[in-house]
Amino acid sequence: MVDGARVGGLRRGITDDERRDAALIWDYHLMGHEVRPCSVGIGLGSHDLGVATFAAELHRAELFPVLVFTGGNSPKTAARFPRGEAVQYREHAMALGVPDSAILVEPHATNTGQNIALSRGLLAERAVAVETVLLICKPYMQRRAFATCRKLWPEVDVVCASQPVSLADYATAFGDERLVIDMMVGDLQRIIEYPKLGFAIEQQVPDDVRRACDRLVNAGFDSHVLGS
């Protein structure tokens, strides 16, 4: 594929049409759940320390008594979180006032399925009764996290939450708008493909969202698509 993201070997700017397509995908990823009290909160590890910040805020609001942070490392997070995603999420949440006694750490997961499965196992080991789960994650990971949890833990009700932030503000804070769009496109592809592999439940994807994804991939926003 010709790299539409580069012109003459240089990284080109992002067009207004591409930003509109990205915004459509961003909105699709958001589940729009009303946050409510749950048995447990689970913060899914990633590059985004805002997950731990928002998890601490939700714990202070008494939306769950037990908070699990889950995640080891990936090539994208090893430099940022050398002690592991979950470990450093825990440290950050404690600095924000969450007591150590309220936090469980699952430090081994390297993908979303393991985040859910290993967190479920840890909670069972600790005899924590779970009827409802509040998943806290990156905004563009909400739908995939929901679909994964419903597949691997169908007995519980699932609510998804993320820091309330716009795509523009998120990309600015992250520091690389193109990479954020790449990651969103990759997550959308996984929402489409993973049910066929047994990793998640199927989610309806509107035609306009699929077309937006195809346009962005053809324009070179493809560094996080499967097989890349």
Image: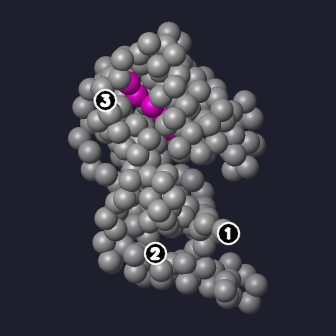
Q: As drawn, is 37 to the left or to the right of 128? A: left
Q: Which residue is mark 1?
A: 228
Measure the C-alpha gap from mark 2 to mark 3.
32 Å
Q: Position of residue 128 (x, y in %)?
A: 41, 16
Q: Residue at x 47, y 80 (%)?
A: 214
Q: Nearer the viewer, residue 146 or 82?
A: 146
Whichever of callouts 1 and 2 sits on the residue coming sooner in the sequence is 2
- Say if 205 sits above or below 148 in the image: below
Amino acid at pointer 2: Cys
Whichever of callouts 2 and 3 sits on the residue coming sooner in the sequence is 3
Number of numbered discs: 3
Measure the C-alpha gap from mark 1 to mark 3.
36 Å
The local secondary structure at tag 2 comes to: helix
Q: Nearer the viewer, residue 151 or 89?
A: 151
Image quarter where the N terminus lies is bottom right
Res. 213 mark: 2
Q: Which residue is mark 3?
A: 132
Dot in front, 2 or 3: 3
Q: As drawn, is 32 to the left or to the right of 17? A: left
Q: Residue at x 64, y 29 (%)?
A: 107
Magenta region, residue range: 40-44
Whichever of callouts 1 and 3 sits on the residue coming sooner in the sequence is 3
For the residues bearing labels 1 and 3, Cβ distance under 8 angstroms? no
Q: Main secondary structure of the magenta part?
A: strand
Amino acid at pointer 3: Thr
Measure the C-alpha gap from mark 1 to mark 2.
15 Å
Q: Nearer the viewer, residue 93 or 222?
A: 222
